[in-house]
Image (cartoon, rainbow, N blue to C red):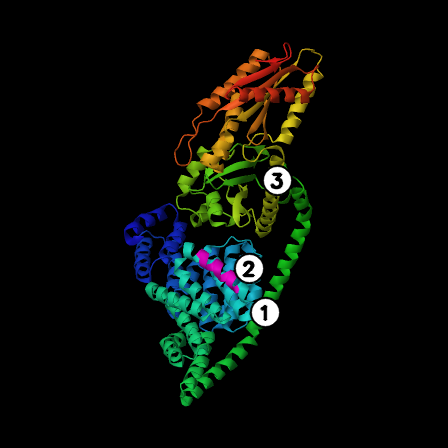
Amino acid sequence: MWLEELNKELGKLKDDENYIIKICEKIRGTESKVAIEAYEAATKFVRENNMLTCAYPWILYNKGWLYFDSTDFKTATTLYEEAYHIFKENNNIDGQLATSSAFVSVYSVQQKLSKAIEHGMEGIELAEKVGNYERLTQIKGNLAALYMEIDEYEKAKELLDQIVNIPRVYSNAIKVACYINQAECCNHLGNLDQAIVYITKALELAEVYTPKMVPNVLKEMAHIYATKGCYGTAEEYFVKSVEMAKAGGAQLYLQDALLYWAELDLVQGRFKETVDKLQQVEEGIEKSKSIRNLNKVYLNMSKGFKGLGNYEQAYAYLERHMELEKQMQAIRSAESMVMLNRKREEEEGKIYKFLYNQTEALNGVGQNILSNLNKESIFNIVAKEIQDLIQADIIQIGIYNEEEGILNSELSIEKGQRLVIGPMSILEDSFWAYSVKHKQDILIKDTEKEYSRYFEDFKEYLEKIRKKKEYVIETIPYSLIFVPIIMKDKVIGVISTQAYKKNFFNLKDLSTLKTLSNYLGIGLENARLYREVEYASKYDVLTKVFNRKELFKETTQMYVQLKESKNANRTLCILMIDVDNFKRINDVYGHQEGDRVLERVADLLQASIGEKDRVGRYGGEEFMVGIPDETLKQCIQKAEIIRKNVEKAVITSALGIPIPITVSIGGANLNTKKYALEQMINYADKELFKAKDSGKNNVFVYHQEEGTGV
């Protein structure tokens, strides 16, 4: 930021101490040296401004992760403990949960698994009690990593699968970590194709939102390709991972990359390279006390030295490996692990029960939505169901226009009253924009405390929504849910429920809204496809005027109404219009330019006729217009307007060459009680031939009084 901008950012803490969370997120995205300076500056500022109960512990917590990433787990633990004490003393629940999650990680890698499990289970219980699902996800993810630490990949995968069923209110960093762990579990369990899917998602997110995690993603990408036997590709990813980890000072990621790279050397018989890489990381991993990684070091060192013919060293490392295997087995059967397994199974049962009940409750609603092909009706069904199931103060649905970068409000209801809301740009700071850009659900229990996760300037946001008059009541809603409506991996809109009370919504409400958003997405897509099919059945795809079938239908309806009228003198004018020299246009300028000419002529026809008139494409380069209740003079005038408008039109080819266009028009203006529609069309067609034979760019109209063309 950096230190030049930091003071300006820190100044915002005077209005809202919780903004420190946003500041620390930015600091964590910088290099280690810059981050240390930034944390020191932030610590000095909060001490001077007596912000020791809220802002200060968040600095300690985030600083702890900096030391964690550099494998200084002792210092990280000390910082977490100090932060946790302050959070607990001031009843900061989110802070307690954040540090509980951190304890799971830091104690796991130090093999203090009982402590890790103790903090994890306490954290899960508290997170469920207060409904903090982001922290719940974070803690479960770290407990999954604990299982992976002792090679229990199936159990880790089960925990990670539970996280998938928690609505995604968590940060991109947590998403990336979950995808990495899912990929690693799938790799070890032999599901390599799924592993690639997960790690690709992790890389896509990390490159945009969490660049510091990219080396870790690349390491796992390399590991998966190595397992697949794609050694060349794996080598490339390992090289990139190591280079990035060194550049960013990410010691933990560097150790992991070299550790797994050594395995690749081993399977290719490069025993010296294996030992060299493992010796680079051995001391660091022994200090970190990661039993899983240390076990890999000892086993692969034994194999490496054996390959080099150094059997004494090979045997020494094999003994260390076997001793660690005994320790891992003891850990797996420990009482704390038994308790964790039991908790995991209980959680899984609760999730399945909840999902079953929700599915039963919403199944009928979904069928109702999916069977409806009218967009407005679909919105109304969804709004009614939300009101019945969630009872929110405000219900809003916005549809995203990607080309214009705006959300158009399709439905906004507050306390039963429909409101008209203007479009919202996704470039502006808002919860709507965040949900669209990040494809992420948002669950907020207190807007004033939680806004900083999504944008920086809360006052500016409040000013904007008040100007737009988004709400009837002067105060703002404190509890919010935003869920993106996603179809084919694209955001097509956002659905939101809001309440004026704090802590109003819970996991069940978010999950309900997610299910409704899925139905809504499918329903809107069905409605869109229906409209497209309906449109294609009526309109010519190229020219956007009626196709021949619909043109006859519309003109016939017009003819029947006129014919059945009590007035005996009602007439119908039929104009047959042909683009002159159209074959030559295609031959000289190409068929694409010919299509553009037809599109332009159709536009000119629509602009030249009246509201009651009907125009359609008769076939090829020929159009037909039906005009009710006009005199011969008016019919001829309208035909001349069409002819002149086309003649004056300027059309240039893609190469900038002008394309001259004219039309010939044949018409018939006849009494509907005396002539059949087919006769009128035939007469108009004959007059069209006369117009073309007379030199083109002419109008001839047959009329009933004289039976001749004019």
Assign a secondary structure to mark 2: helix
Residue 517: x percent and y percent? 58, 46
Query: Does 407 appear in magenta?
Result: no
Q: Are marks 1 and 2 in contact (CB under 8 Å)?
A: no
Q: In the image, 336: left or right of 404?
A: right
Q: Nearer the viewer, residue 168 or 507?
A: 168
Q: Quick one: label 3, few (<14), some, or many (20+) residues within 10 Å? A: some
Q: Give the label on residue 163, or none.
A: 2
Tell me which numbered mark, 2 or 3, is placed earlier along the sequence. Answer: 2
Q: Kindly state the secondary structure of the residue where label 3 is placed.
A: helix
State the residue position of label 3.
527
Mark carried by residue 483: none
Identified at 53% across, 28% down, the residue is 602
Which x, y percent locates residue 338? 58, 72
Magenta stretch: helix, strand or loop mostly:
helix
In the depicted view, which residue is nearer to us: 336 or 654?
654
Q: Secondary structure at mark 1?
A: helix
- The magenta segment is 195-205
